[in-house]
Image: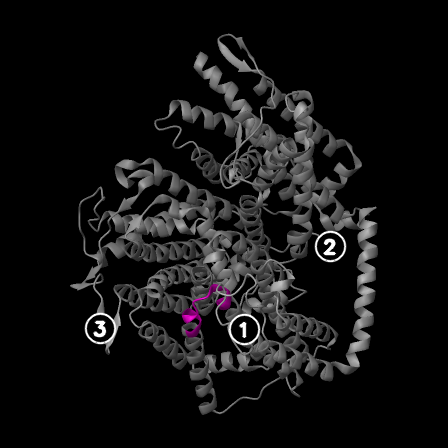
């Protein structure tokens, strides 16, 4: 039982990551019905942006102070991801807004390859996995036999705060309202004075910022980053988005936690668990699509963003 | 503030460009002539200074006057540019294309000379003159007025047939010449020149006439292509290097045609296609008594071929049946997931697949007593054993092409196109859309499985990591580059994407990056590919069309 609870807590941490990434998929899909395959790579870019800032711009005297180093890494990671996402939208996706649907999907695969390979080729040393600095608090405490590290607590708290902030933003702010209007009916939204181009860029930027936070946290948690980290993480996050009902923010977060917990439990309790750990997300994806293609929360259109 | 600044910069750049154009426009002909003359002179001048850094790294002695190495191709490009002076043809297109080609050749060589020589001291006078001529050509091309493409009259049969022979023969000749260029950088210049020549012929309407002739005498055209493909091994003088490459290319081309059934005809995006290829491969590796097999049964290859194809088709149905009911985007992601599942299972099931090490020691093929591992002599020309596989590939490709063509012209093919254009309307017309999509998906998977069984015999080993997602993306890039929905397109795309990196070893590391870039740029500027199907071309360039490739009207905002 203790083992189960221990794994549950680990699953929550993993799920928080997937949820953060999945929000980018779900928001973009909600607005322009595009599966942005390159979103996983935006997550990876966030980690590399934070790493670069830490190694090259942060004075070495400050590198030990988590309260300074973590925000610096987050800010530069976010900046790098958002910049990449905005350029990607502007250069690759926007010109294809009215093209047949196959076209932006194929472009998305191309963009993904460009980002991954570009990082591998031109980030110094990125052909090997790179060490990621220790940015999260040390130490742990025990509750009922379950050991919980402060690092994991930080990750989950940051993720949940961001998710609530995003939900509030989408529901309460005028930009959020514009996003929901665009998701519902872009033409009408435009007639009502919504600058849909700006809304779409904002959506990409928001998703990229959340993915960047996930990237930095993931790097700090595992202590290593690789140029192709984004591929599998992105796929699992997409599964989380579909599981929750694509276009739905609450569902997306729930989907993230479910996928995270399923993965951790499968590693613990199934034979050859760690070898097959990347497999279960896809199995869940296929099962969801067969039995409930709208996802768990798919009907709730009001919170679509 | 930054956007303000970039706007101002953009405006002033546009103003400068406009004023340059007004100056040049009335004098394009003499200025173009002058640029050509400058380039011709530059290409016979010495480009390098002997003794400074350079000499041995470039073929053709660039330090001497005369035509050597890259300079020959610059001269040819300059002559192509001169054809813009002809009364007919799309002058602006000719000038633009040759200007781009000249820029690539000149500046690439200039940069290489500068870098190897360690500065401007190593760059000879010819290179500087060429830079001047190239820039002049760029300015003239920019100022030229576009003219409508020429409408060529229909030609009598002998002219059409001669054109077919010349075109296909010329292609084979260009391939042979290109492969014989040993210097990679010179090959790049050669490739630029060939591309330029084809594009200039396009501007004169020659390529259009060629494709019209091909359509008119389709069987003659295919027969000539077949002859050229069979003749290719005889041009290699027993050299195995390129036969080995093209034996692989042939398999990928066959797989690309199969993928084209799924993507090009039915409009379904299959991102796990390489997994079906891999399933065929594993079946073949296991049942052909490879050294590391885990099954220890040796079945005749023809049987294994069908088994591999059937296994892949079976999995195609398993994956496709549940997901093809949903919107097209989900199919993309599920097939992607399936591709990963295949790889993960192959890695983690060592009892069957020997895990990450894969199955090595796959024997050579033997069909009806003919051993593919032995070199042969034919018509007095020695053929390395790889040529056997190459010929087998041709048989496979012909078979796949026939399947493709028959399907395309059938009721099924029309149903697929209808689904691709508008799924709802297709269903309303009484088409069983799910069954039709499943059929396309399964046929694609089956063809991939069949091609996969041959592939592992060529490589003599199979390992899971040769079946990563990126290779599905690569095959997709081949289909998109060549032209979705056409057979020659898929073959051309596969050949370009697999053979050129073999020739240009220095781009090997950049290969995947460049493929990604090719995908993005193609979708932006030429979504119908190099050899478009006429239907596709209209679809992509019809501004009023709201129809989209995966069914349903486009729901996206008009920006």
| Secondary structure category for the residue under label 2 | loop
Say above or below: B12 vs A25.
below
Which of the two marks, 1 or 2, is nearer to us in this view? 1
Residue B210 falls inside the magenta stretch: no
Q: Chain of mark 3?
A: B
Q: Which residue is mark 1?
A: B193
Q: Main secondary structure of the magenta part?
A: helix
Q: Residue furthest front?
A: B51
Q: Position of residue A7 (x, y in %)?
A: 47, 19
**Circles 1, 2 touching at the beta carbon (< 8 Å):** no
State the CA–CA distance, disc 1 to disc 2: 39 Å
Q: Is residue A39 visible?
A: yes
State the CA–CA distance, disc 2 to disc 3: 63 Å
Q: Chain of mark 1?
A: B
Would you say B339 lies left or right of B140 here? left
Q: Which residue is mark 2?
A: B559
**Circles 2, 3 touching at the beta carbon (< 8 Å):** no
At x 65%, y 34%, the residue is A56
At x 61%, y 84%, the residue is B151
Q: Position of residue B40 (x, y in %)?
A: 61, 80
Residue B180 falls inside the magenta stretch: yes
Q: Do circles 1 and 2 both sit on a common chain?
A: yes
State the CA–CA distance, disc 1 to disc 3: 35 Å
Say above or below: A79 vs B535.
above
| Secondary structure category for the residue under label 3 | strand
Say above or below: B400 vs A164.
below
Q: Which residue is mark 3?
A: B377
Q: Do circles 2 and 3 both sit on a common chain?
A: yes
Q: Is residue B484 visible?
A: no
């Amino acid at each position: 039982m203790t083992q189960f609870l221990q794994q549950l807590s680990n699953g929550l941490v993993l799920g928080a990551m997937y949820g953060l990434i999945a929000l980018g998929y779900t928001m973009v899909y909600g607005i322009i019905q595009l599966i942005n395959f390159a979103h996983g790579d935006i997550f990876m870019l966030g980690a590399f942006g934070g790493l670069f800032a830490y190694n090259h711009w942060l004075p070495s005297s400050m590198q030990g102070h988590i309260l300074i180093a973590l925000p610096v890494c987050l800010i530069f990671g976010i900046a790098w991801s958002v910049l990449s996402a905005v350029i990607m939208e502007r250069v690759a996706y926007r010109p294809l807004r009215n093209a047949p649907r196959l076209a932006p999907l194929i472009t998305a695969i191309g963009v993904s390859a460009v980002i991954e390979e570009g990082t591998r080729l031109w980030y110094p040393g990125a052909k090997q996995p790179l060490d990621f600095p220790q940015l999260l608090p040390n130490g742990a405490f025990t509750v009922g036999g379950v050991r919980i590290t402060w690092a994991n607590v930080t990750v989950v708290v940051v993720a949940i705060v961001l998710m609530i902030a995003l939900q509030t933003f989408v529901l309460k702010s005028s930009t959020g309202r514009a996003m929901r209007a665009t998701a519902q009916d872009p033409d009408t939204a435009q007639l009502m004075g919504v600058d849909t181009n700006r809304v779409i860029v904002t959506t990409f930027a928001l998703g990229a910022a959340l993915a960047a936070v996930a990237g930095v946290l993931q790097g700090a948690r595992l202590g290593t980053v690789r140029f192709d980290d984004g591929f599998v993480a992105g796929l699992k996050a997409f599964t989380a988005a579909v599981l929750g009902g694509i276009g739905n923010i609450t569902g997306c977060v729930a989907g993230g936690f479910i996928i995270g917990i399923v993965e951790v439990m499968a590693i613990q309790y199934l034979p050859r668990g760690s070898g097959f750990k990347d497999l279960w997300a896809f199995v869940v994806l296929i099962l969801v699509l067969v039995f409930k293609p709208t996802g768990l929360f798919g009907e709730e259109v009001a919170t679509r963003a | 503030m930054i956007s303000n600044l970039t706007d101002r910069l953009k405006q002033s750049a546009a103003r400068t460009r406009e004023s340059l154009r007004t100056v040049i426009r009335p004098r394009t002909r003499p200025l173009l002539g002058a640029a050509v003359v400058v380039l011709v002179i530059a290409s016979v001048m010495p480009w390098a200074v002997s003794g400074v850094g350079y000499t041995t790294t470039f073929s053709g002695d660039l330090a001497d006057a005369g035509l050597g190495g890259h300079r020959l191709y610059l001269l040819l490009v300059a002559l192509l540019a001169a054809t813009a002076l002809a009364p007919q043809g799309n002058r602006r297109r000719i000038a633009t294309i040759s200007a781009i080609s000249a820029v690539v050749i000149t500046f690439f060589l200039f940069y290489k000379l500068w870098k190897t020589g360690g500065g401007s001291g190593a760059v000879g006078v010819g290179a500087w003159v060429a830079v001047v001529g190239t820039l002049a050509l760029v300015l003239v091309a920019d100022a030229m007025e576009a003219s409508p493409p020429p409408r060529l009259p229909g030609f009598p049969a002998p002219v059409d047939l001669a054109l077919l022979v010349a075109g296909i023969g010329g292609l084979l000749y260009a391939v042979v010449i290109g492969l014989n260029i040993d210097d990679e950088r010179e090959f790049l210049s050669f490739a630029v020149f060939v591309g330029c020549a084809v594009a200039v012929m396009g501007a004169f309407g020659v390529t259009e006439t060629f494709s019209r002739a091909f359509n008119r005498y389709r069987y003659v055209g295919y027969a000539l292509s077949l002859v050229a493909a069979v003749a290719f091994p005889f041009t290699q003088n027993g050299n195995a290097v390129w036969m080995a490459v093209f034996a692989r290319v042939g398999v990928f081309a066959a797989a690309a045609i199969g993928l084209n059934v799924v993507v090009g005809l039915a409009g379904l995006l299959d991102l796990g296609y390489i997994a079906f290829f891999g399933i065929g491969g594993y079946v073949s590796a296991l049942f052909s008594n490879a050294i590391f097999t885990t099954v220890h049964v040796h079945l005749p290859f023809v049987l294994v071929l069908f088994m591999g194809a059937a296994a892949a088709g079976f999995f195609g149905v398993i994956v496709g049946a549940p997901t093809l009911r949903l919107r097209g985007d989900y199919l993309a992601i599920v097939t992607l997931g399936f591709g990963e599942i295949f790889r993960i299972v192959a890695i983690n099931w060592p009892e069957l697949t020997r895990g990450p090490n894969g199955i090595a020691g796959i024997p050579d093929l033997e069909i009806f007593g003919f051993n593919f591992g032995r070199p042969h002599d034919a018509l007095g020309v020695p053929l390395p054993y790889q040529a056997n596989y190459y010929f087998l590939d041709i048989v496979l490709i012909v078979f796949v092409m026939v399947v493709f063509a028959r399907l395309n012209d059938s009721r099924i093919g029309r149903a697929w196109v209808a689904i691709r254009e508008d799924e709802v309307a297709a269903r309303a017309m009484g088409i069983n859309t799910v069954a039709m999509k499943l059929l396309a998906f399964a046929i694609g998977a089956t063809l991939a499985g069949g091609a996969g069984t041959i592939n592992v015999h060529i490589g003599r080993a199979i390992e899971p990591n040769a079946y990563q997602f990126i290779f599905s993306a690569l095959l997709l890039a081949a289909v998109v580059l060549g032209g979705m929905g056409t057979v020659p397109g898929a073959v051309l795309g596969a050949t370009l994407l697999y053979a050129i990196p073999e020739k240009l070893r220095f781009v090997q590391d950049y290969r995947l990056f460049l493929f990604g870039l090719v995908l993005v740029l193609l979708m932006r500027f030429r979504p119908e590919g190099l050899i478009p199907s006429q239907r596709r071309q209209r679809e992509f360039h019809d501004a009023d069309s709201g129809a989209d490739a995966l069914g349903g009207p486009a729901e996206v905002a008009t920006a």
